[in-house]
Amino acid sequence: MKPIRIELPTEFDVGSVNSYLFTEPEPVLVDCGVETAASWDALNAGLGQHGLTPADIRRLVITHPHVDHFGLAAKIAALSGAQVWIADMGAEWLIEPKKLFGLRADYYRDHFLLQAGLSDEMAQLVLAYFAQIADDITPVPAACIHTFQVGDWLSLGGADWQVLHMPGHASHQTCFYQPDSRQFLSADMLLPKTPTPIVERPLPNQPRQPSLPIYMESLKRCEALDIDTVYPGHGEPFQNHRQLIQTQRERIHKRKAEALALVQQGYHTAYALMNEMYAHYPPAFRFAGLWMLIGYLDLLEAEGRVRVETVGGVWQYYVIE
């Protein structure tokens, strides 16, 4: 059977998020929205159209541990006794989200935002944003959690779907592919608008992983799949996934070239570049472009077109002639 899209509102710039319902052979949800009254009401309404309530859900499958995809998991599990399934690498984010968001905030405060050269005022806006998200999360009890691994097959709607690891937007993101029907539950891998490549906290004694170059590699793997219909984490299902990928790739290369030109003009820090490339945003919201900008710079560095020096704790970017 085809997954049934239930659109749930969020307060984030990305807009609504999708939960996907399979009604047979048992009610299963893939992702479940943020923990707000509006999202809960929309989920109840969407399930009600198929004669169901959240109490009827037997399994809840989470594609990746971002709050707009698992926010209602604890509430659904408490009401229905549903098993909450997630890739083993992401389970801790559901069980101890406040701890892990705190560690990410510590990394941002002590390293990343300083290295990017952000002003104190802008850094505080970023940290306050993450603190608010962490405060609003309800952890999922460990007893409810069941895990799968990359390469496993999950039964959804009477068919077996392959678990694919598609990092870049989120290091723990999984997507689900059904080769016979050529259906792809893409989470936030394939979206109408290129997803933000989130800068993750590195593992101890490890370098920061370049999220946008990693995302570009995941795009190649998606492009190779034989897909008829994509069911994205945001927006309406669509076809012609290769056309979308090519359009997004061209956009990324265009913006990367703009970043390179600005470095040539003397904008040497990520903060300075952000204020130029996202000048159309109000100053208080320009940090929303920081992660994508760092991605463009990571691509340029990987291509050998810029070099990075750390001066006074701040990354300085220079063109390689």
Image (tube, rainbow, N blue to C red):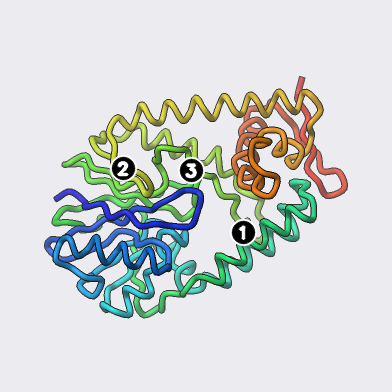
Amino acid found under the numbered disc labelled 2: Glu
Q: Is residue 136 left or right of residue 10?
A: right
Sequence-first disc among 2 and 1: 1
Instruction: Please determine whether, in this image, residue 309 is positioned above or below residue 164.
Output: above
Amino acid found under the numbered disc labelled 3: Pro
Instruction: Please determine whether, in this image, residue 276 is positioned above or below residue 186.
Output: above
Amino acid found under the numbered disc labelled 1: Leu
In front: label 2 or label 3:
2
- The Cα atoms of the two marked residues, 2 and 1, are separated by 35 Å
Give the residue at mark 2. 236
Q: Residue furthest top?
A: 321
Provide the secondary structure element on which disc 1 rests.
loop
- Crowd tier of the residue under label 3, counting other residues whose Cα lies within 10 Å: few below 14, some 14–19, many 20 or above: some
Give the residue at mark 1. 203
Please provide percent x and percent y for residue 181. Answer: 17, 41
Instruction: Please determine whether, in this image, residue 213 is positioned above or below residue 170.
Output: above
Q: Considering depth in this image, is 101 or 320 the residue closer to the camera? A: 101
- The Cα atoms of the two marked residues, 1 and 3, are separated by 23 Å
Provide the secondary structure element on which disc 3 rests.
loop
